Image (cartoon, rainbow, N blue to C red):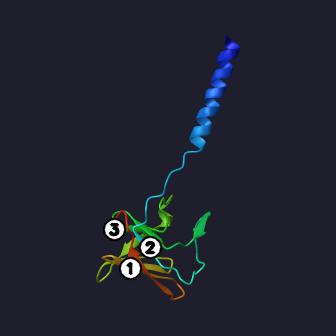
């Protein structure tokens, strides 16, 4: 009996690990998307974390913005800075202007890309 119970517990544990390991979490839709044509090949770096700049912009309460759906540290947030009109987020030479359903992404090299509110975005 002990042998069967041990085998049953092992099988159940393997099943739970198998099911939990295959669960995928969908990213929320971005609030804005920017057309990065031509692709600027910019890599954002936050300590040990780095990823390519995409045209997706996420922001939670209007006081900060992120280029990733799930920022893992304060370093991944762009703070809101004073703006004469609309919202402006700026850090590390990258500036994002948002007003209504439109926006502008400016990179340190002076290039800029237009942005629009994404369908189904959170803000």
Q: Depth-wise, is mark 1 or mark 2 nearer the camera? A: 2
User: Few, some or many C-alpha atoms within 10 Å of disc 1 (few <14, some 14-19, many ≥20)?
Assistant: many
In the rendered image, which residue does mark 1 sit on? 103
Q: On the rendered structure, is 94 left or right of 31?
A: right
In the rendered image, which residue does mark 3 sit on? 62
Which mark, residue 33?
A: 2
User: Few, some or many C-alpha atoms within 10 Å of disc 3 (few <14, some 14-19, many ≥20)?
Assistant: some
Query: CA separation, marks 1 and 2?
Result: 9 Å
Residue 46: where, in percent of width, then height?
56, 66
Relative height, residue 72 to residue 10 (above, below): below
User: Few, some or many C-alpha atoms within 10 Å of disc 2 (few <14, some 14-19, many ≥20)?
Assistant: many
- Residue at x 38% of width, y 79% of height: 103
Contact check, label 1 and label 2, Cβ < 8 Å: no
Residue 3 lies in what quarter of the image?
top right
Q: Earlier in the sequence, mark 1 or mark 2?
A: 2
Q: Earlier in the sequence, mark 1 or mark 3?
A: 3
Label 1 SS: strand
Contact check, label 1 and label 3, Cβ < 8 Å: no
Q: Earlier in the sequence, mark 3 or mark 2?
A: 2
Q: On the rendered structure, is 49 left or right of 34?
A: right
Q: Residue furthest bottom?
A: 110
Label 2 SS: strand
Q: On the rendered structure, is 56 left or right of 41?
A: left
Residue 39 lies in what quarter of the image?
bottom right
- Residue at x 58% of width, y 34% of height: 16
Q: Depth-wise, is mark 1 or mark 3 nearer the camera? A: 1
Label 3 SS: loop
Query: CA separation, marks 1 and 3?
Result: 14 Å
């Amino acid at each position: 009996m002990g042998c069967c119970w041990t085998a049953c517990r092992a099988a159940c544990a393997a099943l739970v690990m198998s099911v939990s390991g295959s669960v995928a979490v969908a990213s929320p839709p971005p609030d804005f998307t920017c057309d990065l044509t031509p692709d600027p090949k910019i890599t954002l770096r936050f300590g040990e974390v780095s990823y390519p700049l995409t045209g997706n912009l996420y922001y939670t309460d209007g006081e900060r913005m992120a280029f990733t759906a799930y920022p893992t540290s304060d370093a991944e947030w762009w703070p809101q800075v004073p703006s004469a009109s609309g919202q402006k987020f700026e850090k590390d030479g990258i500036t994002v202007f948002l007003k209504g359903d439109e926006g502008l992404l400016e990179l340190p090299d002076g290039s800029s890309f237009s942005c629009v509110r994404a369908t189904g975005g959170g803000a």
